[in-house]
Image: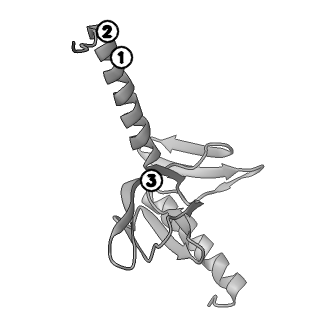
Amino acid sequence: MSFRPSKPLTAALLAAALCAAATTAQADIVTINLDQARIVKMPDRVATIVIGNPAIADANLQPGGILVLTGKGYGSTNIVALDRQGRVVMDNNVQVVGPPQDGILVVQRGLDTETYSCTPRCMPRLTLGDTPAYFNAVGSEMSSRNGFSSGTAK
């Protein structure tokens, strides 16, 4: 005598398997905000970290298997961790998303975009996607200010 599952039971088992696969796939995505860092605990024996697109994310391996992952640009890339023998011990996707919108004001004038940080007073914010003239002006001002604080300003 053989057991043949009913069609509803087969459909339920298939749905459960698909849900489990979707949950596993989502667990392999590390989401990080642009211009922010996230700490990720790495598997044992990690010797080398490879970022697919360093313009999207940057990684810095610290002692004790701690990885500092920083969002550099919008988009998706991957991170691969290798052991000393070159074996892959981790391969995850990294998704860099926009910053939290709390206190952010985006001014749109036709095709021109300017972003301000309003915490509590609105001040210019350097944000990818802003109009080049605005972005460059804010970036130049920030660079000058940072030069004064480090003593390298001319």
Q: Give the secondary structure at mark 3.
A: loop
142 left or right, relative to 120: left
Q: Quadrant of the C terminus?
A: bottom right
Q: Give the secondary structure at mark 2.
A: helix
Q: Is residue 36 above or below residue 119?
A: below
Q: Which residue is labeled 3 in the image?
A: 129
| Residue in view at x 44 percent, y 36 percent | 23
The picture places residue 58, in percent across and down from the top left corner, at 47, 68
Label 1 vs label 2: CA separation? Answer: 6 Å
Q: In this rendering, which labeled residue sits more in front, label 3 or label 1?
A: 1
113 left or right, relative to 78: right
Q: Which residue is labeled 1 in the image?
A: 12
The reply to whether discs 2 and 3 touch (Cβ–Cβ < 8 Å) is: no
The reply to whether discs 1 and 2 touch (Cβ–Cβ < 8 Å) is: yes
| Residue in view at x 62 percent, y 78 percent | 144
Label 3 vs label 1: CA separation? Answer: 45 Å
Q: Which residue is labeled 2 in the image?
A: 8
| Residue in view at x 32 percent, y 75 percent | 86
The picture places residue 30, in percent across and down from the top left corner, at 48, 52
Q: Quadrant of the N terminus?
A: top left
Q: Is residue 137 above or below residue 127?
A: below
